[in-house]
Image (spheres, rainbow, N blue to C red):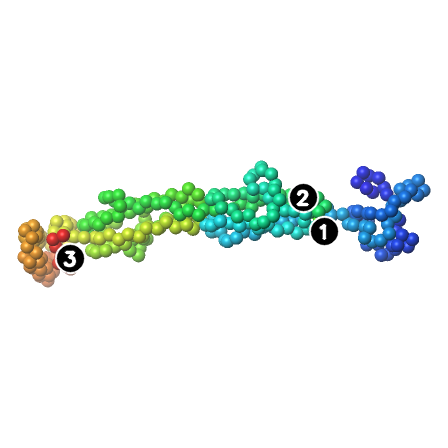
Amino acid sequence: MNTAGATTHVRVDARTGLTQTAFPFREGQAVTISGVSSNAKAGFLLRVTAPNDFEQVDVVPPVTSFGLSGSPSNDGWFRENVTVTLTATDDQSGVARIEVQQTPGGAFQPYTAPLTLTTEGTTTLAYRSVDNRGNVEDAKTITVKIDKTAPTATLTQSGGPSVHNIMIDGSLAFTLTGTDTVSGIASQDLILDENRIASGSEINALPLGLGAHRILARVIDKAGNVWEQNQTFLIETSIPTIKNLTARLDDEKQIKNKGIHTSIDAKLDTVQSFLTKGDTTQATKHLKQLQDILNKGVTTGQLTDNAAAVLNANIDYLLSHDLLK
Ligand SMILES: [Ca+2]
Ligand SMILES: [Ca+2]
């Protein structure tokens, strides 16, 4: 029966060059037949002469698959251009062409060579193939997400817009604000020396200790592009700072009597007056005397080991750095 519903008799026997046992097609299969036709017994007779006069009809569309250059991040973003390669196979008549639609709703164009996607953001391609029999595959889509640009970020420190030195009796807080307009922020990290800290959290300088410290700020977008800033700052001290620390240690009952507190302050005032005059020799001499007072104070129970250690570390820092700066 043909597609119009008409029946055509096909003669297959030894006189036509075929035998029924050699006939490869079975009931239910659709075939295209070419042959010699004639009228016979008021019917239409198609007379075939060889097996290649029959061709099984191809009703199955091709299957197209795609390959992408590179590998995306865990969030599905590529950090570089992506080359899309399409390949198709067909069950029978062969692939006539592969087609690709580069903008949603646009026309399908013949695919002739791999496509390189360079635009940041999300690109959706539709693709399909057609076989030599005209069977058209249902279109499938590929979504490719590209972000080639590092995030932008600002690192600020409390008490000033940028990273700066602070005194040891103070505190600090770092705030990291990252933005990424393409894939978005995946992570933001602040690492102070070797420890992760929370953005905006206030940290006392005293436990960090005097000297150089490092703040590493890192923002990573969902494609894996990195913004990073690594800065150093100093935690410093001064005579007024040591006086503040002494008052704090007194409040914490680490300085046991008024007398030693008064002696420490008096010595610090003396050192400051020599520093003001530019006499570092006398300033150094009095700082060393202050250390003797602190060490004796520990043995006589006038202040704790910790209080003496904190104050001595500050004095050592002043002695080992330029006192007049
Ligand atoms: Ca096919
Ligand atoms: Ca980005």
Element on which disc 2 rests: loop
Contact, CB < 8 Å: mark 2 with mark 3? no
Other-residue count near label 2 (Cα within 10 Å), few / some / many at <14 / 14–19 / ≥20: some
Q: Quadrant of the N terminus?
A: top right
Q: In this view, does 156 lie to the left or right of 125?
A: left
Q: Where is residue 135 in the image (x, y as percent from the top left)?
A: 70, 44
In-front residue for pair 157/48: 48
Residue 120 lies, with reference to residue 210, above or below; the image says above
Task: Please tell me which residue is depicted at 47% across the width and 50% down the height of the picture.
Answer: 80
Whether label 2 lies within 8 Å of ligand 1 gets the answer no
Q: Where is residue 269 in the image (x, y as percent from the top left)?
A: 7, 51
In the rendered structure, which disc, 2 or 3, sits on the residue that comes first in sequence? 2
Element on which disc 3 rests: loop
The type of residue carrying mark 1 is: Gln
Marker disc for residue 136: 2
Q: Name the residue under label 1.
A: 92
Per the model, the C-alpha gap separating discs 3 and 1 is 86 Å
Other-residue count near label 1 (Cα within 10 Å), few / some / many at <14 / 14–19 / ≥20: some
Element on which disc 1 rests: loop
Contact, CB < 8 Å: mark 2 with mark 1? no
Q: Where is residue 21 in the image (x, y as percent from the top left)?
A: 86, 56
In the rendered structure, which disc, 2 or 1, sits on the residue that comes first in sequence? 1
Task: Please tell me which residue is depicted at 82% across the width and 47% down the height of the picture.
Answer: 34
